[in-house]
Image (cartoon, rainbow, N blue to C red):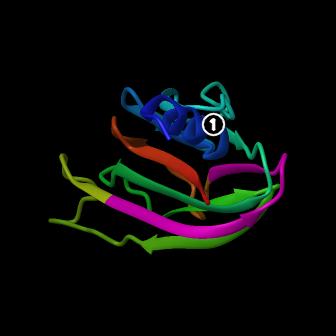
Amino acid sequence: MSINNAINKVRTNTPCFSAYISTNIEVLSDPIFDYALINNTSSYNPSNGEFSTPSDGNYVIGYNILFDAGMGQENVGFYISIGGVPFNTIIIPWHRRINGFYGVHPYYITLNQTNIYTLSAGDIVKVVSATYEIGRYYIAPYSYFYGYKII
């Protein structure tokens, strides 16, 4: 098989995407990874942060989020949502008090998760905020969301 044929086979048979957040964003709802670095089947939408699986199969899906924990947030977390159903929620109970004050900048925490999911064509996959306390936090640039089909 020639290199061009191998590349075309990967393009058509191995859907993959990798997207990141391009600037500090204050998150008052679910994070949207606005810059698609790789999106070989155009299945990732950087406008709403959703990946629509183009074909049935097993997919590796993951995220890595770097956020500013200095805003007084008590619990911060994220999860993978497939068709609106949460999977594998990661919550960090965050009780940091220094000299009687919440939030001494800069202070960042990273949350990450990678799993294999069996998905059907058209399933909508996204990262969803699972924050239980009222408050604000900022996601730092280059936090990313990615996925690819296992052949």
Q: Is residue 75 visible?
A: no
Residue depicted at 63% across the width and 53% down the height: 128
Question: Considering only vertical position in the picture, is 105 above or below 102?
Answer: above
Residue type at tag 1? Gly
Question: Considering only vertical position in the picture, is 147 above or below 99?
Answer: above
- Magenta run includes residue 98: no
In the depicted view, which residue is nearer to us: 59 or 91?
Answer: 59
Residue depicted at 55% across the width and 70% down the height: 115
The region drawn magenta spans 110-127
Residue 29 horizontal/vertical position (percent) = 63, 42
Question: Considering only vertical position in the picture, is 70 above or below 130?
Answer: above
In the depicted view, which residue is nearer to us: 141 or 137?
Answer: 141
- Magenta run includes residue 113: yes
* Classed neighbour count for the residue bearing mark 1: other residues with Cα under 10 Å, few (<14), some (14–19), many (≥20): many
Residue 81 horizontal/vertical position (percent) = 71, 58
* Residue 98 placement: quadrant: bottom left
Question: Considering only vertical position in the picture, is 27 above or below 126?
Answer: above
Residue depicted at 57% across the width and 55% down the height: 134
In the depicted view, which residue is nearer to us: 61 or 126?
Answer: 61
Residue depicted at 25% across the width and 68% down the height: 97
Residue under label 1: 49
Residue 50 horizontal/vertical position (percent) = 68, 40
Q: Is residue 49 visible?
A: yes
